[in-house]
Image (cartoon, grey):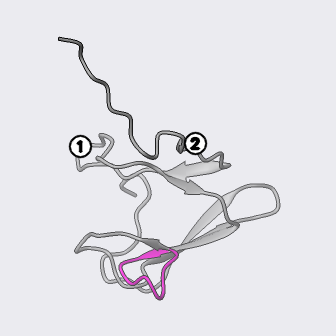
Amino acid sequence: MASETKSSPLSWLRVRPVIAPAYLSRVTLDGQAAPGAPIALTAREATFGTDPVQATNVLDDPSVAPLHCRLRQDDRGNFTIYDQGSVSGTWVNFE
């Protein structure tokens, strides 16, 4: 009995990695990488929150506000994060 291999109807479609100047990764309380793919920061400005109308990157987390924070890249390639008045604040590496 020969084994039969079925190919996906979309086998020609391959996901290409996104090349970005930086990536945003979520971490757990103990500092380990949280499940999920990192968010590629491909635009000069990105917003994060739970509301898809207000945020360009939607996060499903009860501690995240509808429009939680804004991330901007300057002309030198540096990133600055701005809290948008969220109740829980915006943290980078637990600071």
Q: Amino acid at mark 2?
A: Pro
Span highlighted in magenta in the image: 48-56
What residue is shown at x 81% (from left), y 56% (from top)?
76
What residue is shown at x 29% (from left), y 47% (from top)?
35
Residue 4 is situated, as x and y percent measured from the top left of the image, at 27, 23
**Residue that carries the numbered disc 2 in the rendered image:** 17
Tell me, yes or no, whether the highlighted magenta stretch contains residue 26. Answer: no
What residue is shown at x 48% (from left), y 80% (from top)?
55
What residue is shown at x 46% (from left), y 88% (from top)?
53
Q: Quadrant of residue 49?
A: bottom left
Res 30 label: 1
Looking at marks 1 and 2 on the same chain, the residue that comes earlier in the sequence is marked by: 2
Q: Nearer the viewer, residue 49 or 94?
A: 49
Q: Secondary structure at mark 1?
A: loop
For discs 1 and 2, the disc positioned in front in the rendered view: 2
Q: Nearer the viewer, residue 29 or 53?
A: 53
Prevailing secondary structure of the magenta residues: loop
Q: Amino acid at mark 1?
A: Asp
Q: Residue furthest top?
A: 1
Query: Which quarter of the rendered picture does the C terminus lie within?
Result: bottom left
Binning the other alpha carbons within 10 Å of mark 2 as few (below 14), some (14 to 19) or many (20 upward) gives: few
Vertical arrangement, residue 36 with respect to residue 47, above or below: above
Q: Residue furthest left?
A: 1
Query: Which quarter of the rendered picture does the N terminus lie within?
Result: top left
Tell me, yes or no, whether the highlighted magenta stretch contains residue 50. Answer: yes
Between marks 1 and 2, how big is the CA–CA gap? 28 Å
Residue 50 is situated, as x and y percent measured from the top left of the image, at 35, 79
